[in-house]
Image (cartoon, coloured by chain):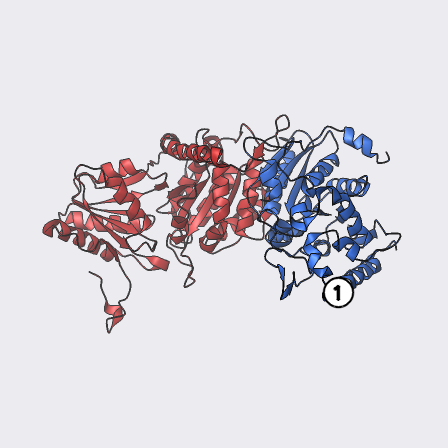
């Protein structure tokens, strides 16, 4: 039986952690993820878990301690945001290449500068090539559900990769929402126990982790890791199918919302999907053929499936909540556009960078995006492929009145 | 049972021959001695910082280590060791762990005094049950003898070369052992590769079998960086302790004990003249460098004697 409650995204994730009862949690505080280890510290203090809770001196060390613990045969977890994730950068690669299925909760937050504590995906997108699986949540329910699936996905024998469970900083991490929690025992049964084949503390067979790989061997290791990430696609769907069977909530690589006959569509991630969904409903009520794709899994990138879902559209806007400074679009656009490159007929595509550092994204903004797509369809002119939305225009006298469209 | 080198050498090797370290390098000798200090029935997990030792002892698909081993990065060895120690603790508590394991961390001076200093300090403060061995060869040797905070004053390193305007490194060596002691760890010691290895063995054994975070700082000559013929290694380590450049002592629960007092304290140039990195100090006009080096060694030695309870 599900338990109805009202929790923030951080407390939902902490609850999932408590139910899973991992062996080692190495923590270092950073806004807005800090509450996760705080809640967990109280579970430790109250004897609700028997986890070794290590309060390390930096994020570099929190993930490094997880590397040691996971290699030693334990389930190891941590949580972070923004600069903390950047500080982990080097160790993210170590964890992934050593094939250690650590689970890392990220309350996504902008990177400096200017220093900013609010939400965008600068932090997680900067780590998209680290070898971590990345799963994004629209709300606290999804953050909780994704977390319950994370260990099983990462620990799948032909995957063995670390997993980032991403929620939107403050928007999801701190906002209270209704949620359906599962019973502790049901969660434990679903997640199962972790029994790796080989680990450092195995008595009868020592293990060596993290070799110097010279040119004759390095590439094979990287290709094996690339294969593991491909295998993760199947594991994500398998675990999602079992999750649906067990708990009744359905997940995949992405959610296609009113896409069947959509002529124009928006590709969006995280909490913005709720806003986009409201705009789709409004416009559909006006008889306009609009739809939305909410991307849940960014690594592995479901390129084929996404291209297939977009193939019948005439124009698509990809919404990027991080600025990659490529001067030609953000990371979600680059990946989505390249996924569509071999389609026989493909939609015209634009990239809109929005919501940086917590800049609001409203239903009106979403309607503007759809209007622009409809204009592209009407005129056949794509216009600027890469643009920003929601910022003031310093060239205008009254910059607060500025509208991009 | 009294220490006996011959008996010790009869133990099965736990750091195998065939590694790729240079002839005359102290790191391999340190690892063999470190592993001999393990009780034979116990197992170890070795956490190694990126270093000469790492690239030379675990080059895929070969490893010189008979025990479990993990390397991930340069600066995080103590944090990795923290994780392994935590894993061991929780597995013991849950009744999942068989056998007796010891967590050993090992890094060079770059990975310990400098880039790994934060993670070392953090792990010491948290009190994990592990032993950190620093093989201090006085510079970043893996990248080609760049100065570290362990490089002694006047040593010529590739980033502090001697020249017309330079007499080598300007700063004295960081006194890391004292900084470690300031963490109030239960045991810390300085040793080197000397004679019958009794000093090393006893300190390493005590460190490994003392509960909590413990630290052994090993002066570990490098023939490439210090510029000496390989066979001179034991002479150089002997001179290091007889000149008091590298005093041998241990700190047990905060109490300093001198473990070696030279019968006759030799002048510091006896240590310096054996090594090419100090060659410029012996040029006419640079006599003051040797005087300065002597003054510093004397000062540090007197300070140490004043701290020790057994002088």
Chain in red on the image: A
> Where's residue A66, x and y in %?
54, 42
> Where's residue A116, x and y in %?
42, 61
Between A289 and A405, the one lying in front of the other is A405
> Where's residue B166, x and y in %?
63, 64
Location of residue B266 (image quadrant): bottom right
**Local crowd at mark 1 within 10 Å, few (<14), some, or many (≥20)?**
few
Q: Report the residue marked by disc 1.
A: B287
Left or right relative to A125: residue B215: right
Quarter of the figure with the C terminus of chain A: bottom left
Chain in blue on the image: B
Left or right relative to B168: residue A111: left
> Where's residue B140, x and y in %?
61, 51
Q: Secondary structure at mark 1?
A: helix
Check the image and report above or below for B10 versus A16: above
Quarter of the figure with the N terminus of chain A: top left
Q: Residue at x 38, y 55 (%)?
A: A119
Q: Residue at x 43, y 50 (%)?
A: A107
Between B26 and A328, the one lying in front of the other is B26
Residue most toward the top?
Answer: A204
Left or right relative to A3: residue B82: right
- Which subunit holds the residue at mark 1? B
Between B54 and A386, the one lying in front of the other is B54
Residue most toward the bottom?
Answer: A397
Left or right relative to A302: residue A191: right
């Amino acid at each position: 039986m599900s338990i109805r409650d009202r929790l923030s995204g951080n407390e939902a994730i902490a609850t999932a952690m408590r139910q899973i009862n991992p062996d080692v949690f190495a923590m270092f505080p950073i806004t807005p993820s800090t509450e996760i280890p705080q809640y967990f510290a109280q579970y430790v203090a109250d004897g609700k878990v028997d986890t070794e809770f290590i309060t390390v001196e930096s994020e570099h060390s929190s993930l490094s301690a997880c590397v040691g613990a996971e290699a030693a045969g334990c389930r190891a977890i941590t949580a972070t945001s923004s600069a903390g994730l950047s500080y982990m950068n080097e160790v993210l690669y170590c964890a992934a290449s050593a094939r250690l299925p650590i689970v890392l909760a990220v309350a996504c937050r902008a990177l400096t500068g200017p220093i900013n504590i609010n939400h965008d995906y600068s932090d997680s997108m900067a780590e998209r090539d680290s070898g971590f699986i990345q799963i994004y949540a629209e709300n606290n329910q999804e953050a909780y559900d994704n977390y319950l699936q994370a260990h099983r996905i990462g620990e799948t024998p032909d995957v063995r990769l670390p997993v980032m469970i991403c929620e939107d900083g403050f928007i999801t991490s701190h906002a209270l929402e209704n949620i359906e929690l599962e019973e502790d025992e049901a969660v434990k049964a679903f997640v199962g126990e972790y029994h790796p084949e080989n680990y450092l503390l195995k008595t009868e067979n020592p293990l060596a982790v993290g070799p110097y790989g010279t040119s004759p061997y390095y590439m094979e290791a990287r290709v094996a890791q690339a294969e593991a990430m491909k295998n993760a696609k199947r594991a994500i769907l398998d675990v999602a199918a079992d999750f649906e069977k067990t708990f009744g909530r359905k997940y995949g690589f992405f959610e296609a919302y009113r896409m069947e006959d959509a002529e124009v569509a928006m590709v969006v991630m995280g909490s913005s999907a709720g806003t986009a969904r409201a705009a789709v409903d409004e416009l559909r009520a006006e008889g306009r053929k609009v739809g939305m794709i909410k991307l849940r899994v960014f690594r592995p990138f479901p390129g084929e499936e996404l291209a297939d879902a977009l193939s019948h559209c005439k124009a698509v806007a990809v919404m990027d909540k991080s600025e990659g400074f490529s001067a030609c679009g953000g990371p979600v656009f680059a990946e989505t556009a390249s996924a569509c490159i071999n389609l026989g007929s493909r939609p015209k595509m634009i990239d809109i960078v929005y919501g940086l550092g917590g800049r609001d994204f409203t239903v009106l903004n979403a309607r503007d995006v759809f209007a622009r797509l409809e204009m592209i369809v009407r005129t056949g002119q794509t216009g600027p492929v890469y643009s920003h939305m929601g910022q003031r225009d310093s060239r205008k006298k009254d910059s607060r009145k500025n509208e991009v469209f | 049972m009294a220490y006996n080198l011959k008996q010790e050498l009869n133990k099965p090797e736990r750091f195998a021959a065939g590694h790729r370290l240079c002839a005359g390098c102290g790191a391999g000798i340190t690892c063999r001695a470190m592993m001999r200090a393990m009780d034979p029935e116990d197992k170890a997990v070795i956490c190694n910082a990126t270093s000469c030792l790492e690239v030379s002892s675990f080059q895929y698909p070969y490893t010189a280590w008979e025990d479990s081993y993990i390397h991930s990065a340069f600066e995080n060895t103590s944090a990795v060791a923290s994780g392994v120690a935590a894993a061991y603790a929780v597995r013991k508590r849950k009744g999942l762990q068989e056998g007796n394991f010891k967590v050993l961390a090992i890094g060079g001076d770059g990975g310990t005094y400098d880039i790994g200093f934060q993670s070392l300090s953090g792990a010491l403060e948290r009190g994990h049950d592990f032993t950190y061995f620093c093989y201090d060869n006085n510079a970043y040797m893996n990248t080609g003898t760049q100065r570290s905070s362990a490089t002694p004053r006047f040593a010529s390193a590739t980033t502090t070369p001697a020249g017309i305007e330079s007499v080598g490194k300007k700063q004295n060596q960081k006194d890391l052992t004292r900084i470690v002691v300031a963490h109030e760890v239960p045991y810390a010691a300085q040793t080197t590769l000397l004679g019958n290895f009794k000093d090393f063995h006893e300190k390493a054994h005590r460190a490994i079998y003392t509960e909590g975070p413990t630290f052994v700082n090993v002066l570990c000559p490098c023939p490439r960086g210090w510029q000496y013929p390989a066979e001179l290694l034991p002479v150089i380590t002997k001179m290091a302790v007889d000149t008091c450049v590298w005093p041998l002592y241990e700190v047990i629960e905060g109490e300093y004990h001198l473990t070696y007092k030279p019968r006759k304290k030799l002048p510091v140039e006896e240590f310096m003249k054996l090594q090419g990195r100090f060659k410029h100090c012996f040029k006419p006009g640079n006599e003051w460098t040797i005087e300065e080096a002597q003054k510093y060694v004397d000062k540090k030695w007197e300070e140490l004697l004043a701290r020790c309870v057994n002088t």
